[in-house]
Amino acid sequence: MSTTTSNREEYEMETAHETIEPDALALGGAAAVVSAVVMLLPGVFGAVSVYEGVVEMMEQWHLFFEPPVVGTVTGMIEAAIISYVFIYAFA
């Protein structure tokens, strides 16, 4: 099925004036996933005694982060919730 040039031009003119608005839920969810993965990395590195300075800083700055598995998971949940709330609020 082919369209004429005038139909294509009309379609392009209509779509060119539409604005794309960000989906706050999707952005918040993506930020939560990224934050949780980033929080997982110091937990893994802390478990194998690599980047101990980073692990110490994470323990200072985050309420629930600790190198053991439970502390890492709670730190991931903390990071995900905080990121989701901030991104959703400002998106």
Image (tube, rainbow, N blue to C red):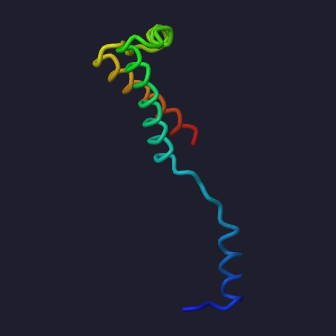
Residue 16 placement: quadrant: bottom right
Quadrant of the drawing holding the C terminus: top right
Residue under the point 46% across and 28% down = 38
Q: Position of residue 72 (x, y in %)?
A: 35, 20
Quadrant of the drawing holding the N terminus: bottom right
What is the total number of numbered labels drawn onto the structure image? 0
Q: Position of residue 29 (x, y in %)?
A: 44, 42
Using residue 25 as the reference point, say whether residue 44 is left or right of it. left
Residue under the point 61% across and 58% down = 20
What is the residue that sits farthest to the left in this orientation? Answer: 70
Using residue 69 as the reference point, say whether residue 20 is left or right of it. right
Q: Position of residue 89 (x, y in %)?
A: 53, 37
Relative height, residue 10 to residue 53 (above, below): below
Using residue 8 as the reference point, say whether residue 91 is left or right of it. left
47 or 11, which lies in front?
47
Residue under the point 52% across and 32% down = 86
Using residue 15 as the reference point, say whether residue 37 is left or right of it. left
46 or 56, which lies in front?
46
Relative height, residue 20 to residue 84 (above, below): below
Residue 17 placement: quadrant: bottom right
Residue under the point 42% across and 30% down = 36
Q: Position of residue 44 (x, y in %)?
A: 37, 21
Relative height, residue 57 to residue 20 (above, below): above
